[in-house]
Amino acid sequence: MEGIFLLYNVILLYFQQKLKINLFFLAYVENCCNFAASNIKNKLRIMEKYIVQIEFRYRAIPKIYNDYTSDCYDKKITIGIYDSIDEAIKQGNKSLEVLKAKFSFNDCFSKNGGIFGTANKLVCSFNNRNKPQFFANITTLHFDDIASVMEDVFNAHERWLQNKG
């Protein structure tokens, strides 16, 4: 984080002394550096874990709820919560191997097999409507201090208000 502030001071001195740039631009550079420093601070503070879940959607004999009959059901199970995306992908793919016995699909979890080379965190079966379906996903869980998140949210909103006007 000290590197960001050092970079900010170098940029500030350069523009002040060499280019005689206006104060609006200097305030913009300062705001960008503060935002970058805030993001670095957030990255260090946040703890992330990855949860692997599978949701089954199916039809069964209807139950009556308050005069409403439904034959659509779902069950969601949690495979596990993991410290790294690599471990979540590995365990998620092991679970998909079990599903291949009853479902037809060609996809798997991967770190860079998704759209534009991003992580593929969703695998589903799209069978015909008369068969059960599943949706397996890896979700990132963010653990953080509520007070610091609130502060970040209000600071970001304040920057937005200043930028808007």
Image (cartoon, helix red, strand yellow):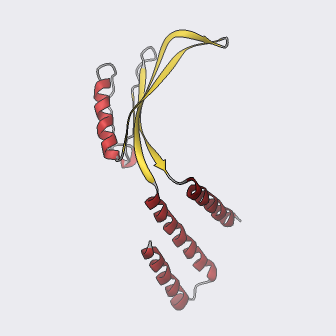
Residue 11: percent from the left, percent from the top? 49, 81
User: In front: 146, or 32?
Assistant: 146
Left or right for 20, reference 129 = right
Please report the residue visible at 67 percent of the width from the left and 11 percent of the height from the top.
67
Decide if residue 31 is in sight here.
yes
Residue 163: percent from the left, percent from the top? 65, 66
Decide if residue 112 is in sight here.
no
Q: Quadrant of residue 20?
A: bottom right
Q: Does residue 37 lie above or below 95 as drawn?
A: below
Please report the residue visible at 31 percent of the width from the left and 43 percent of the height from the top.
87
Which quadrant of the rendered structure holds the C terminus?
bottom right
Residue 115: percent from the left, percent from the top? 40, 44
Left or right for 72, reference 48 = right
User: In front: 88, or 118?
Assistant: 88
Please report the residue visible at 57 percent of the width from the left and 71 percent of the height from the top.
31
User: In front: 150, or 112?
Assistant: 150
Residue 118: percent from the left, percent from the top? 38, 47
**Count of marks placed on residues:** 0
In this view, which residue lies farthest toward the top?
61
